[in-house]
Amino acid sequence: MISTPPRARRARLVSLSVAVALLSTGCAQASVASPSPVAAASSSALTSSPQPVSSPIPESARPAASGYLGTLPRDAFADTRAAAMQAALDAAIRAGAPDVIAAVLTEDGAWSGAAGIDGPDGRLATPVDEFAIASLTKTLTAALIMRLAEKGTIDLDEQLAAYMGGFKVDTNGATVRQILMMRGGLADHGDDAPDRIIADTSRAWTWPDRIAGYLPPVSAPGGYLYSSPSYELLALAAEQVTGTSYGQALRTEILDPVGADRIVDQEAGRVTPQPWAVPINEHLGRFTAADIGAGGAISCLSSASFGTGAGSVASDAPSMAQWLWHLFAGDILDAATLDRMIEGGLQGWAYGFESAPYSEAGAIANSGSKTGYGSQWVYFPSSRAIVVIFVNDPDFIVEPTVGQLLAAAVAP
């Protein structure tokens, strides 16, 4: 991925080169603090250098014996709350979003909704439209690696090089843990990545193809440096130790055990489930309408497979929200593992998590962006809520809408 690191992007310092680069595998969505009562303070606090926190995990978020959250909620919210959440999506359309799809879970209920247009010929968005979740993929990859570490299949403190099989790639002497925390000193994708992706939108990229395009490491391991190739190499490591594809490893280790059958890695030979959320013409960037869906994937197979493990997954909003609920309920990883991941994320982007720009203490999130697709998930520990939001415009600011959704969900 070629992009400004996610925390810096929240300050809206998006250059023209970054905008062009959004053809790539996925990067954190540009966003600012919301004026909502539940929103965070200014984005100036969200620097790219990790900041220490005195209490990484608030007491309200600490896991009980059964995990952070309880049983996955199945009941629908009361009509008044559901109407207020739908009104938040309708307001986003009036504010300029082409479409917006969201899912909300709390211990009181489940809700999903959609508004606007996300298909050809003015097709209206639906809550179950499949979406290219871009860098939300990294949360899944981190959970996969942590699950393999729990099983003893991967050692987090071993050098990543030990898991590269026969592939010759410079992993900079970094450990798996350093790579998970974006502290391996590896470079992000080069400026030529968009040209490589768009040259053949049906292309299925292979590991030799990907590795050939990687730039040399840029620093010694230790400091934070956002790098999509880091997470692509974690996907390669998972393939080497499981003897399967990255997508199948996801399926076996962290998706099928909780019934997440509509979260899919968009690998060659797999057609992404439909209906698809696709960008309208104003948000296609260098793509044409005919490019969308090339190779059976969204935005296209070339974009998805270019960044396996970093920006390759598609999901609908309810499925993503349910998977996250299972994650924070301790159904996928042990509580001690989640503690480690959350602590790292709150101190700076790590393990597929980062501190979220909302006022609720300990809120954790991840954001994703690629041409035509912007996504975010947030776990609010005190409210015991999950919010997932998708917009087919990576530049639309989603924080006000997320704040309104949370306020409606937890209203007395």
Image: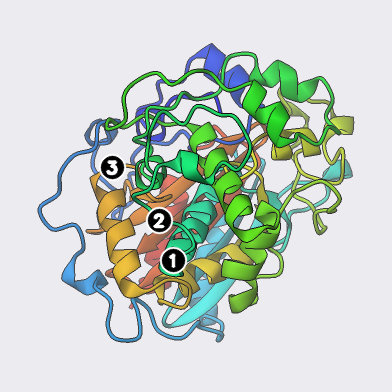
Mark 1 crowdedness (10 Å alpha carbons): few <14, some 14-19, many ≥20: few
Q: How is the image coloured?
A: rainbow
**Can residue 88 be seen in the rendering of this structure?**
no
Name the mark on residue 348: 3
Asked if residue 33 is positioned above or below residue 144 in the image, the reply reads above
Name the mark on residue 155: 2
Q: Quadrant of the C terminus?
A: bottom left
Whether the residues at callouts 1 and 3 have beta carbons within 8 Å, the answer is no
Residue reaching furthest to the left: 54
Most foreground residue, 298 or 388: 298
- Dot placed on the residue nearer the N-terminal end, 2 or 3: 2
Whether the residues at callouts 2 and 1 have beta carbons within 8 Å, the answer is yes
The kind of residue on which mark 2 rests is Asp
Dot 1 lies on which element? Answer: loop
Name the mark on residue 152: 1
Dot 2 lies on which element? Answer: loop
Whether the residues at callouts 2 and 3 have beta carbons within 8 Å, the answer is no
User: Which image quadrant for residue 404?
Assistant: bottom left
**Can residue 254 be seen in the rendering of this structure?**
yes
- Pinpoint residue 386: horizontal percent, then vertical percent: 44, 66
- Pinpoint residue 263: horizontal percent, then vertical percent: 67, 61
Name the mark on residue 381: none
- Choose mark 2 or mark 3, whichever is in front: 2
- Specify whether 295 is left or right of 102: right
Look at 84% across and 41% down and name the residue there. Answer: 293
- Dot placed on the residue nearer the N-terminal end, 1 or 3: 1
- Specify whether 177 is left or right of 85: left
Asked if residue 384 is positioned above or below residue 302 in the image, the reply reads below
Dot 3 lies on which element? Answer: loop
- Pinpoint residue 230: horizontal percent, then vertical percent: 49, 36
Most foreground residue, 123 or 197: 197
